Image: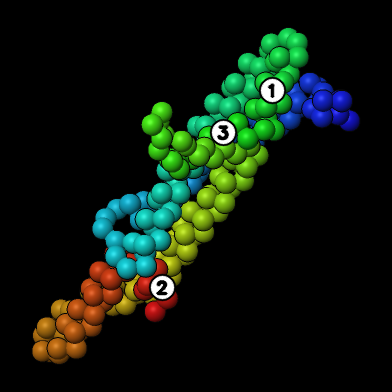
Amino acid sequence: MTGGSGRAPTGGLEAELAQRDAAAGRMATSLVELDAHPAHALLSAGPLTGRTAREWDGARADLAGLWRDFDTYRQVLGAARDALARAGSAGEAELHRLLHEPSIEVGRAVVERRLTGAVERIESITLGELADRMEAAFDRVHELFVAVHAGHERFLAAIGPLAERLRTGRELAAELGDPRTAELTARVEELTARYTTDPLAVADA
């Protein structure tokens, strides 16, 4: 039940802050695990091309934005804890503002220039909206990592046995003068090079 001001009682806000704090801990764990995902190392290892390069450009920006937003999230929670520690209606009002009102600036653009200075449009969101934005970005990055990792595993499963047979057969092929092994080896090397720079395209092929 809310009071006449439309704000939740301090007890309710305190409980919500505790939930947000717990969520921040889970976010930290998820972000560390995302950074440590095997696909992250694959995508960061060298130059990429094609579809993989395009998707990684977007995901890399999402990942950097995730860490920035998480830092902002934690800063807001810190300010909210400070507000909770202050007695009286002023602290309660500040706590409500931080938890429920669009208090987080996420964009600023000049919409008009006047003699007295620029007129700016400021975009602000709530803490809940920030969490939703982070969740969406996390999903996009994680989806790419899962696709790249699964493709990598399939590629290794397909190319590994063939490469092994080629290695063991090269000596015999050289003795027999059979050119097919050299041709197949070149094909394997070509596929490996293509996969290294654009694993998503190879996975779709």
The residue type indicated by label 1 comes to: Leu
Q: Residue at x 29, y 65 (%)?
A: 49
- Kind of element beneath mark 2: helix
- Kind of element beneath mark 3: strand
- Mark 1 sits on what residue? 95
- Tell me if mark 3 has few (under 14), some (14-19) or many (20+) residues whose alpha carbon lies within 10 angstroms of its own: some
- Seen as rendered, the residue at the extreme top is 87
The residue type indicated by label 2 comes to: Ala
- Tell me if mark 2 has few (under 14), some (14-19) or many (20+) residues whose alpha carbon lies within 10 angstroms of its own: some
Q: Earlier in the sequence, mark 1 or mark 3?
A: 1
Side of 98 where 89 appears, left or right: right
Kindly report which numbered mark, 1 or 2, lies closer to the viewer in this rendering.
1
Kindly report which numbered mark, 3 or 2, lies closer to the viewer in this rendering.
3
Residue 139's disc is none
Say if 117 sits above or below 138 in the image: above
- Mark 2 sits on what residue? 203
Mark 1–mark 2 distance (CA, rounded to whole Å): 50 Å
Say if 201 sits above or below 134 in the image: below
